[in-house]
Image (cartoon, rainbow, N blue to C red):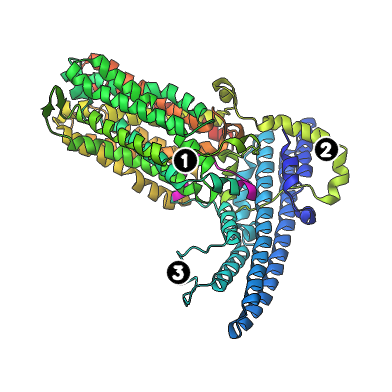
């Protein structure tokens, strides 16, 4: 594979070569620093000062060039504005067409400038990450904090990119006015939502979006999905994305996500009653609910592999498996067979196509709307989680048709079977299979771990990265050595080919993030799966009351994410939110224990709400951090980062559901405390691991 420096050199603009960050020189400087510290000729303080000064000089060079180019574009726009004003008095269609093309030419040059900034931003992230890795010191955090908000910092010029925004606005406004509006006198400001149909403006907007990864609600939701993003797509790749995109196919993937989450949680309020009606203990509901997760451990792998070749086929298989599984689940009542019930749930788990849904958004949705699609994926999951228990609460009836019984236990199965049948028909009629041919020749994509390595970098550090011509001669002697070492350090960027190879790519910080993800999924599964048994034993709640409680928990997901994404994440660092959320989860678990008699409804509801909400906050922040620290080799292929996180969460759910069933043998009076003890232990372990890991990085 081509080394990182070579790949970026191929994308540089030759006439601007001397204004990129000298990546090779800085990489060799890092290597030199390491050697000097090892032999004792330099101390760490001097190295930090010297490297900071070098970065400041490089960034200043970029910013001054950026301002110069913005001035040139502004001068061209001023001259075009004069021509535009004269045409307002004496319109001439041929001159209007020429003027429109001139504005587009400015837009294309602006697009080159945006790519220049974006390429350099990747280089800065790379060299900062390399420095941190070689020295075991979080220099990135220090550098960003001390430069980003300083009044004289050159980073401010790139961070706010006010000049670029002004040029984008001028080009867009004038092209809008030069369009044939069929007699309309409204300006672009009167119709801000009206799309401007011009490919140059669309490309500029997409490039600006990539330079403005500010922390907001859509970003926060998208990070829940752990869907990998392109870091530096070329215009050709964007065109390929547009050709592959099919709105109805995306909608079908989101519908699959929604229905699967409904299918997962619709049985929770009635699983204990169903188990009792078949002659089993109420706590067997843990196995009934968890059987779906057991099958999902295996289905996630083969669906991830299957999506390398097709999206339509795995979705069809998923629908059929879920149709069969729900039918068996409903028939188990009349067959009086707990085995048929469990087989039905296993079939439902075998139909888990969430890996396909994630992959479709990652591969087939254009970059300009991928963030919205990722947020829609998470929203569909949250809505399904709330609708499942709510729907179960509505299915409170009892009647027979021939030999089939329809009651609160069987109706969830029958309703979901019909839903999947309708979905299957819709899928066969409307889904459009995208082409997979281009992937063989497509450049490997950067993962989210590179694209969002640091909040501050993504929000504003629009900096660069290539070899300047004046240093070319001194680099020639060691160019081959640098490229070889870089290729070795980057592991050729090939995707992992097995679970074992993927596991070897996990750094200690990634393992901690996966442990946290395991913990929060375990805690949430304990809370949700045993809720029916616990509330029936202590409070004598009906199925409808349990359904309302679970639906209310599900409805908190989106509001909580809005608050965290728009406010909390802008006030505190992600690692601070992470640790605080873990501590709150731990407090919620402690409050859930049955220590004082009687065990009251307010205690259970309040502690459950604390656990669930804090776990939701923790999930979003944890996946955001996970996407930054995960190897770029886990961004694509069968064994990707999304699969690893899914497997960690699914295994946690399996163990949690098994814990409920095993604890049931000790009696329902001990069920609550016995299942909370492992939750407390895992939560404390994750807090300790978080403190140890992140303290060692600073």
Percent position (x, y) of residue 333?
19, 20
Name the image quarter holding residue 498.
top right
Q: Earlier in the sequence, mark 2 or mark 3?
A: 3
Which of discs 2 and 1 lies nearer the camera? The answer is 1
Question: What number is the disc on residue 432?
Answer: 1
With respect to residue 64, does 80 lie above or below?
below
Asked if marks 2 and 3 touch (Cβ < 8 Å), the reply is no
SS for dot 2: helix
Pick the residue in front: 147 or 315: 315
Which residue is label 2 attached to? 479
**Could you say which disc has been placed on residue 191 in the image?**
3
Magenta residues (range): 218-237
Tell me where residue 200 appears, x and y as whole percent. 61, 60
Q: Nearer the viewer, residue 617 or 36?
A: 617
Q: Residue at x 75, y 39 (%)?
A: 30
Give SS at disc 1: loop
Quadrant placement of the N terminus: top right
């Amino acid at each position: 594979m081509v080394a990182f420096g070579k790949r970026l050199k191929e994308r540089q603009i030759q006439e601007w070569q001397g204004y990129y960050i000298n990546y090779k020189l800085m990489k060799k400087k890092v290597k030199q620093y390491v050697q000097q510290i090892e032999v004792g000729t330099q101390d760490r303080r001097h190295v930090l000062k010297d490297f900071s000064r070098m970065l400041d000089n490089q960034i200043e060079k970029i910013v001054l060039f950026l301002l110069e180019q913005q001035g040139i574009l502004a001068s061209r726009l001023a001259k075009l504005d004069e021509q535009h004003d004269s045409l307002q008095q004496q319109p001439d269609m041929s001159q209007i067409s020429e003027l429109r093309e001139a504005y587009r030419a400015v837009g294309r040059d602006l697009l080159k400038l945006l790519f220049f900034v974006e390429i350099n931003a990747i280089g800065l992230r790379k060299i900062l990450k390399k420095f941190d890795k070689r020295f075991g010191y979080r220099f990135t955090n220090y550098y960003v904090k001390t430069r980003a908000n300083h009044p004289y910092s050159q980073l401010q010029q790139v961070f706010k990119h006010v000049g670029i925004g002004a040029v984008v606005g001028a080009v867009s406004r004038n092209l809008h006015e030069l369009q044939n509006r069929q007699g309309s006198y409204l300006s672009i400001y009167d119709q801000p939502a009206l799309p401007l149909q011009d490919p140059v403006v669309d490309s500029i907007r997409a490039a600006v979006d990539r330079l403005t990864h500010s922390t907001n609600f859509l970003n926060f939701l998208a990070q829940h999905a752990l869907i990998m993003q392109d870091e530096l797509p070329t215009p050709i790749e964007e065109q390929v994305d547009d050709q592959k995109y099919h709105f109805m196919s995306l909608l079908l993937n989101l519908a699959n996500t929604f229905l699967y989450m409904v299918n997962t949680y619709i049985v929770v309020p009635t699983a204990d009653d169903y188990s009792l009606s078949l002659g089993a203990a109420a706590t067997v509901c843990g196995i009934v609910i968890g059987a779906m997760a057991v099958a999902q451990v295996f289905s996630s792998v083969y669906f991830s592999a299957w999506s390398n070749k097709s999206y339509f086929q795995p979705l069809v298989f998923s629908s059929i498996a879920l149709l069969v599984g729900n039918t068996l689940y409903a028939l188990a009542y009349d067959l009086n067979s707990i085995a048929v019930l469990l087989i039905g749930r296993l079939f439902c788990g075998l139909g888990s196509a969430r890996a396909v849904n994630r992959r479709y958004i990652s591969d087939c949705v254009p970059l300009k709307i991928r963030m919205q699609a990722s947020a829609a994926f998470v929203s569909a999951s949250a809505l399904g989680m709330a609708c499942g228990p709510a729907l179960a609460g509505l299915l409170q009836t009892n009647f027979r048709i021939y030999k089939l019984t329809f009651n609160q236990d069987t109706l969830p199965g029958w309703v979901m079977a019909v839903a999947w049948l309708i979905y299957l028909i819709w899928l066969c009629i409307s889904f459009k299979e995208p082409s997979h041919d281009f992937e063989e020749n497509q450049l490997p994509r950067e993962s989210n771990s590179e694209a969002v390595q640091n909040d501050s970098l993504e929000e504003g550090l629009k900096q660069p990265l290539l070899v300047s011509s004046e240093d070319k001669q001194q680099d020639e002697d060691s160019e081959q050595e640098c490229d070889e070492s870089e290729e070795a350090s980057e592991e050729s960027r090939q995707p992992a080919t097995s679970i074992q190879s993927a596991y070897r790519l996990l750094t200690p910080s990634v393992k901690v993030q996966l442990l946290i993800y395991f913990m929060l999924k375990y805690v949430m599964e304990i809370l949700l799966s045993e809720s029916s048994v616990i509330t029936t034993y202590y409070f004598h709640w009906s199925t409808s009351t349990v359904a309302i409680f679970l639906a209310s928990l599900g409805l908190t997901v989106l509001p909580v994410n809005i608050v965290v994404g728009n406010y909390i994440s802008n006030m505190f660092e992600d690692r601070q939110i992470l640790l605080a959320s873990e501590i709150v989860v731990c407090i919620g678990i402690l409050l859930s224990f049955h220590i004082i008699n009687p065990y009251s409804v307010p205690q259970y509801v309040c502690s459950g709400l604390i656990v669930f909400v804090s776990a939701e906050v923790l999930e979003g922040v944890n996946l955001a951090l996970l996407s930054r620290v995960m190897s770029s080799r886990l961004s694509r292929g069968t064994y990707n980062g999304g699969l690893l996180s899914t497997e960690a969460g699914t295994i946690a759910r399996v163990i949690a559901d098994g814990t409920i069933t095993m604890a049931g043998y000790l009696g329902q009076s001990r069920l609550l405390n016995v299942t909370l003890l492992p939750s407390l232990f895992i939560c404390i372990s994750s807090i300790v691991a978080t403190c140890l890991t992140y303290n060692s990085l600073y």
